[in-house]
Image: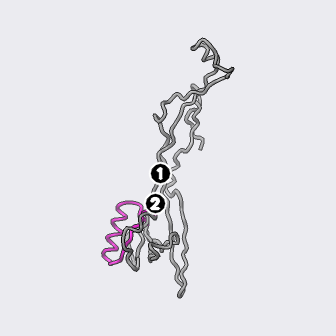
Amino acid sequence: MQLAGERRGGPSRPPGIDGVVPREMVEPASAEDVAAVLASASKQRTSVVIRGGGTKTGWGRTPSPVDVLLSTTFRSDQGNPLQANYVVTSAQVAQTLGRPLSGNTPSITVNLLEPGAQWGDRINEFDLRVAKVLRFGRTRSNVGVDIYNLLNSAAVLTYNQSFTPGGRWLVPTS
């Protein structure tokens, strides 16, 4: 069978949809790839079950047999909130308040940014699973490889959030 787009063997995780193992699994990278796979399957009169990251697979009767399993996995998470933590000494506070910090506290940390005003990089992740069902007589084995963060966006996950004038504020730490 020839389909447009990336062809994969049947998945090994999960074993299928409602116990039906597809002959192939296709994981498109774009809406155009999805359209090409569906057009190709229509021309060849093959059944297609859409499985978005393994969710909501019990919405209706699963066709039998499943020829192609169309699988998608994409995550886009908001970055972490940023802070500008400035350490103010008791002597600096005394200049403004006219007295030192209470309890002989040597310093206090103050966030100079309003909470939620600035955010780190958005974290996008695209995972890919390549799997094949191997049949030997009456036995069936699933072989697969998972590739995580395929596009390797390299978004900054953590920053130096200690603020000092002319210092290294917001320099990536990972």
Disc 2 crowd, CA 10 A, few/some/many (<14, 14-19, 20+): some
- Circle 1: residue type: Asn
Residue at left offset 49%, top offset 48%: 123
How many discs mark residues in the rendered view? 2
Question: Residue at point 64% right, 19% down?
Answer: 102
Q: CA distance from mark 2 to mark 1?
A: 11 Å
Q: Is residue 98 above or below residue 22?
A: above
Q: Is residue 162 above or below residue 68?
A: above
The stretch of residues the image draws in magenta is 27-53
Residue 166: x percent and y percent? 57, 26
- What residue is disc 2 on? 73
31 over 49 or under it: above or below: above
Vertical arrangement, residue 26 with respect to residue 174, above or below = below
Q: Callout 2, which amino acid?
A: Thr
Q: Position of residue 79 (x, y in %)?
A: 49, 44
Q: Quadrant of the C terminus?
A: top right
Name the disc covering residue 100, or none. none
Q: Residue at x 57, y 34 (%)?
A: 161
Q: Is residue 51 magenta?
A: yes
Q: In the displayed structure, does residue 12 sit left or right of residue 101? A: left
Of 50 and 97, the residue lying toward us: 97
Q: Quadrant of residue 30?
A: bottom left
Residue for badge 1: 124
